[in-house]
Image (cartoon, coloured by chain):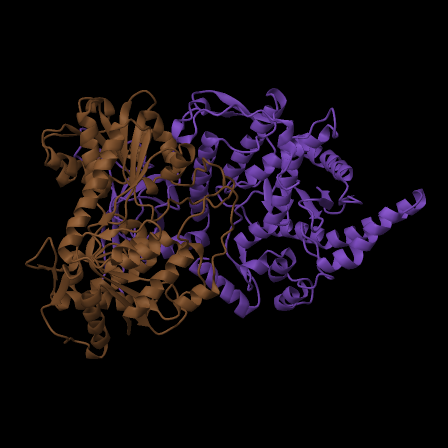
Chain colours: A purple, B brown
Amino acid sequence: MSTLTALARAQARAGGEAQPLALVRHLHIAERPLVFIPLALAGEANAPLAAMIGDEADSPRLLVVNQPRNRDERFAFAAELARVVVPYLEGFATQAEDVASGGGETRPRFRYAPQVFMPSRASIGFARLLGRSTRFRRTDGEYAVDAAVPVLGRWLSFLAERAEHPGSCLLVAATEVLSLHWASGQSGLEDLNLAALMAWIEPPGGLTCLQAAAAAEDPLQWPPAGPATDPGFDNEVLAPLIDAYGRADGAAALQRAEAALARALSAQLLPTWGLMWRSIALLRALPAGGHVGKRWDEDRAAFTSYVSYLRDGDGLPQPRRDGAVAAARRLSWLERAQASYAAQRAFDDPLAMAEFRMSGEAFAGRVVAAEPDRLDTSGRRRTLRPRITVETTDPLTVETGTELRAVTRLTQRATIVSVEPGGPGEPIRVVIELAGGMGRSLVAEPGTVPETGEWLCYCSLPLGYQPVTDFPATNETPWTHGGPPVPALPADEDAVEDWS
Amino acid sequence: MSTSTGVTAATATATAAELAARAADEVIADLAARHRAVVVDSPPGAGKSTLVVRAARALAAAGGPVMVVAQTNEQVDDLTDRLARGDPALPVGRLSAQGYVPSARVARHLAVTVSASVAELADCAVVVATAAKWATLRAGTWSCAWAVVDEAYQMRSDMLLRIAGHFERALFVGDPGQLDPFSTIDIDRWAGLTWDPMQSAVEVLLRHNPETPVRRLPVSWRLSATAVPLVAEAFYPFQGFLAGTAPGERRLEFATRALGSRPRVTGALDEALGLAADSGWVLYELPPRHTVRTDTEAVWACASLAERLVQRGCMGYSEQTPAGAPVGAGRIAIGTAHRDQSKAIRAVLSGLGPALAGVTVDTANRLQGREFDVVIVLHPLSGRHDASAFHLEAGRLCVLTSRHRHACIVVARAGIPELLDAYPSTEPVHLNVPAKFPDGWEANQAVMAHLSEYKVRA
């Protein structure tokens, strides 16, 4: 936890209400997101028990596995889930637009993309494992499953992999994005409880945040958001109902047992369902950050390319494991995404930038001197290289030669020429040389060079294009990493889990 | 443990030198035996760079260009300089990034060619560059029989993947006790895979080529006879290593007695310095308290110890300087876990006057591979209320406590052993991930147990 987050948490505790950690929204909120809340059966590895799912707040769909220990019922659940999820996802793969892909060429990209909201990282983990246990299933021969099941598996795997990607919001964990925007007055562990976190941000009518957060600890009032269920509910409600279902004799008794299970599970899920839609509404009310659209474009591109892979390619399921080259390449993508996500958040949001001003990677201050018409005559051609001096009281750690960008002047490159430390209590004076964004002539266009008195915030995080890292082709994997691998073709054994 | 044998000073030195020479000869013989890869583990200050230079020259003499891979530009410049000094006739290439300005120690050698393009270095017998630079070469623009990889435990597996196409065989040299490579991404997606891109280059190599011979350098020339027992026991519990110098061969003396401008504090400071001169280790213990990372008292303690050391005109006597050499600011380092701690200490030092401007203050990551006479360490767990994996990492403490030739002063809040007891390692254990010894918790306990005998209360 950073110092500023710790301060915000302390203030939230002292003041009795959540403190904002962001002034803008750092994720895209789709027009029609899908809320998906799964529950798992305790004591069974990733056995689905129930799910509440839907893209409209007032019409949740409840799916129940009456006997979660029965393998056939689990896959029937997966097929039913597929009939909700897959049409939702594929419904966005209709209208495409052409976007430039470099070299004067264009490629299609879908105008809209799906967005799935789940309560927490643990729920995403459940979806990931459900995807893994369904994507390799065969639709013919022994133990055949419904044709929709492996398709669901591929989609869930795609979404869960995308959720590892920093800044992506095709699949979102509500507690995670809420904690990104608000600091509560409780611990990080308690923030994993959606009800408790929401109690701090938007307490239900008549209660203070502290009262609401205390009430959220009562599992009868606020059942857990899943996938784990409340042990009290398991013992006192669920187990007798499943037993009754197992003993039910005759169609009417079976129907009664099913209805009782559905009622009980619906009561467990409905409070979370409400919280999920309230958190979406809360986030939607924030203004979007400047780079949110750009990241959503990348999400749409990822969605487009997976749709076209499923349609045109051989549509093989994602391999169980990444090969040596695939793993290295993915790590490189993730690290690049992480770096640019951090930079984009900082440039979009003064509160995020404050973290970097604290750590000395960014600084803000007033321009105290400017040479707007300075020319660099050292090269073959004279070039316009204005210099400005900024006075700051921020604890600066960036060194001479560092490249900077100003928050309000993103197209202009800036380089630190010198840093003059002030005495104790005196501001630091930073001399900065500017290049670009000033027009083509040797005289800067009006307003393109900061004037004396202007307040600016400069940051050293790289915002621009990062070159793609080269890796050898998979069939050229070197001997240090085991040599070229045997091409991974999905086999029946892939569907077998080590723990099943 | 081999370090505590009661041999006399003279024979200990002779034996150590012989052992070291034999180990290096064995490595060179392994290279001639046409193994696909050879790994050399080296404790701190055991002549790793000397071995890299010797191996590169031997391989170059056997024919064909040799590529030398280091991890930072600083290390590349060092190796280039050492290669050129060792054999002024050897054509050495320094492959660099666009816009690199050769440092003075590289530019002074006539036989060194500096270029950003590998094509211009075709005539060089040895070409040195950072791993990151080698990785930018397109496939087919460079190939050679042998690569020598320095600091191979600090290189990540995915970096090796990118450069492995450039060579057929390789010698990997590194210190397994130092900091592991890290990633900004925290996922366990690849845990247990033999090619996990987050592990070190040596780990991935050994997991795919288990027949690779692994040699060890047995003698540390940097660490003194007082330093080796702690470092070997805490961080190299199974391999162990010897000190190259005998007990008493190195000592510190002070030109002035204990007097100072702030008598109330200097008492404890002088006691610490005295103990450091006598025993090589000091635990400078502040009263227990939970603090923020930049604990003002601890920061001041580190800076004041450095100031006092310089004020008192410390002289170091060793096998290299039998007549004594001053331990000036340039020979003192202060090591921390976090950059903000370094920054806070630097700020205090700059306020204490120009005499301390030469003191190196940096994090463990940046002190890696460097050597000083006296090192002052702000203990990573000092003042903390929890012990995270970052702060427990054995490599971090190993780097901090193995940079010194004479003495190491550890500054810490009291209560670290209790903190360790309250926070045993809770890292998840993954299947198929080779266990690492020692783990950070155990190494920290061993260090604190040893240091408790050298405690000075502030």
B56, A427: nearer the viewer: B56
Please state if A465 lies on the left or on the right of A388 as rendered. right
Instruction: Give the x, y percent position of residue A307.
Output: 61, 27
B20, A372: nearer the viewer: B20
Instruction: Give the x, y percent position of residue B342.
Output: 29, 58
Q: Residue at x 94, y 45 (%)?
A: A252
Q: Residue at x 21, y 40 (%)?
A: B22
| Image quadrant in which the C terminus of chain A is located | top right
A193, B164: nearer the viewer: B164
B275, B313: nearer the viewer: B275
Please state if B66 lies on the left or on the right of A76 as rendered. left
Please state if A142 lies on the left or on the right of B23 as rendered. right
In the figure, residue A233 lies in which quadrant? bottom right
Furthest residue toward bottom = B264
Instruction: Give the x, y percent position of residue B359.
Output: 19, 58
Answer whether residue B357 is visible to the viewer in this image: yes
Answer whether residue A363 is visible to the viewer in this image: no
Q: Is residue B175 above or below residue B347?
A: above
Number of numbered discs overlaid on the protein picture = 0
In the figure, residue B133 lies in which quadrant? top left
Instruction: Give the x, y percent position of residue A476.
Output: 42, 23
